[in-house]
Amino acid sequence: MISFARSLSGKSLQNDAYFAHLVLVLQQTGLPPSRLQLEITEGVLIQNSRNALNMLTEIRNIGVGLALDDFGSGYSSFGYLADFNLDRLKIDRSFLSGLEASKKKQNVVRGIIALANSLGLTVLAEGVENEAQLDFLIAERCHSAQGFFLSQPIEENRLTNHLAARRGRMKDADKFRLGLSA
C-alpha cells in the first residue's frame, strides 16, 4: 500500500483554516486519512505547543498519521514523545554521518531506536548513504530508512506518473496529487 508523507509547518498549525483545507483535500482526492502522514519538527512544537497540540489532536482524530521529523537535531525534548500522539520518529541524518566509525553515535542511534520501539513508534532513519549504515539499522530493528544509498530523490510528478502507470491508470494521475501546502 502506498502512503504519502508531507511536512507540516508551524505556520499551518497556527492557521485555523488548515484543518478544514486538509479535510477538503482528503475528500477531493479520495485518499484515506490513514494513508497520509504529516511530519512535524520539534521546533514547531516549541513555537506554540498548546495550539499545536490541539490542531494535532484534531488531525490525529480523523486518522491522519503524525511523525516527529529530524529527532535529535535540535531541542530533543523527550516530553514531546509523551505529550503528542505520534506514529513515527525520524532520526536526523546527522547521527548517521560517520556512524560506522563512532561507537558514541552507534549508541545514541541504538538508544533512539530502542526508545521509539518501546513507545510503539515506527522509526525511520534519514540520510543512509552506505551499506554499513543500513546493516546497522536493520540489526537494531529500525523500521525504515531513506537516503542516497537506497534511492536518489524523485520528483513528485515523475513518481506520481510512475505509480499511476504501474496501476494502468495514467489518466487518473492527478487524483494522486495532494494539494496540501505545508
Image (cartoon, rainbow, N blue to C red):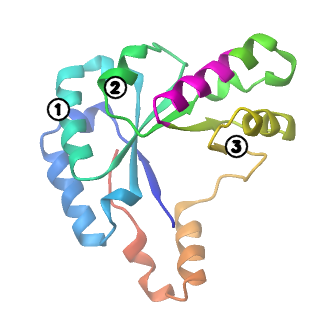
Q: Earlier in the sequence, mark 1 or mark 3?
A: 1
Question: Which element is circle 2 on?
Answer: helix
Asked if residue 65 lies left or right of residue 137, the reply is: left
Q: Residues within 10 Å of mark 1 (few under 14, many from 20)?
A: few
Magenta residues: mostly which secondary structure?
Answer: helix
Q: Are marks 1 and 3 in contact (CB under 8 Å)?
A: no
On-image quarter of the C terminus: top left
Per the image, is 110 magenta?
yes
Q: Residues within 10 Å of mark 2 (few under 14, many from 20)?
A: some
Q: Disc 2 residue type?
A: Val
Residue 94: % across, % down: 66, 23
Magenta range: 108-121
Question: Which element is circle 3 on?
Answer: loop
Q: Quadrant of residue 176?
A: bottom left
Q: Are marks 3 and 2 in contact (CB under 8 Å)?
A: no
Q: Disc 1 residue type?
A: Asn
Question: Which element is circle 1 on?
Answer: helix
Q: CA distance from mark 1 to mark 3?
A: 33 Å
Q: Is residue 40 above or below residue 25?
A: above
In the picture as drawn, the residue positioned furthest to the front comes out as 118
Q: Are marks 1 and 2 in contact (CB under 8 Å)?
A: no
Q: CA distance from mark 3 to mark 2?
A: 24 Å
Q: Residue at x 75, y 10 (%)?
A: 104
User: Which disc is residue 44 wearing?
Assistant: 2
User: Which disc is residue 54 wearing?
Assistant: 1
Q: Disc 3 residue type?
A: Gly
Residue 165: % across, % down: 58, 83
Q: Earlier in the sequence, mark 3 or mark 2?
A: 2
Q: Which residue is mark 3?
A: 147
